[in-house]
Image: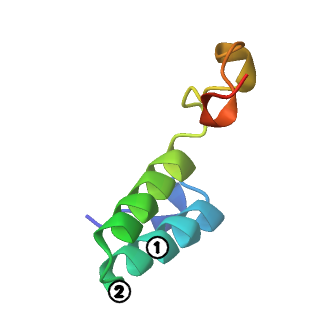
Amino acid sequence: MTADITALDVPTALVQRVAILLDATTRTHSPSDALAYRLDEWLVTHPDAPISTGADYPDWTPGGVR
């Protein structure tokens, strides 16, 4: 029995984005870039992931200067 390819529930655009990020991960020689690409890939595949905003840290200032 062969699975029908039209039964995939992943949009083609999402598959393309993930493929680009995974390709970039394998091509880089920088561990930090590879990590960033993997994190990007995770965020692309988990759009409902909780992301912090400025409201989560009301007293924070860049560099700790007030």
- Residue 65 sits above or below residue 37 on the image: above
Spatial CA distance of label 2 from label 1 is: 12 Å
Q: Position of residue 9 (x, y in %)?
A: 53, 50
Q: Quadrant of residue 22?
A: bottom left
Say which residue appears at 35% left-offset and 68% top-offset. 34
Q: Position of residue 8 (x, y in %)?
A: 49, 56
Circle 1 residue = 19
- Which amino acid is tagged 1? Ala
- Residue 30 sits above or below residue 12 on the image: below
Q: Quadrant of residue 50?
A: top right
- As drawn, is 16 to the left or to the right of 3? right
- Residue 38 sits above or below residue 20 on the image: above
- Which amino acid is tagged 2? Arg
Residue that lies at the very extreme toward the front in this rendered image: 65
Question: What secondary structure is marked by label 1?
Answer: helix
Dot 2, crowdedness within 10 Å: few (<14), some or many (≥20)? Answer: few
Question: What secondary structure is marked by label 2?
Answer: helix
Residue that lies at the very extreme toward the left in this rendered image: 1
Mark nearest the camera among 2 and 1 is 2
Q: Earlier in the sequence, mark 2 or mark 1?
A: 1
Q: Which mark is residue 27?
A: 2
- Residue 64 sits above or below residue 8 on the image: above
Say which residue appears at 36% left-offset and 74% top-offset. 25
| Nearer to me, 34 or 62 | 62
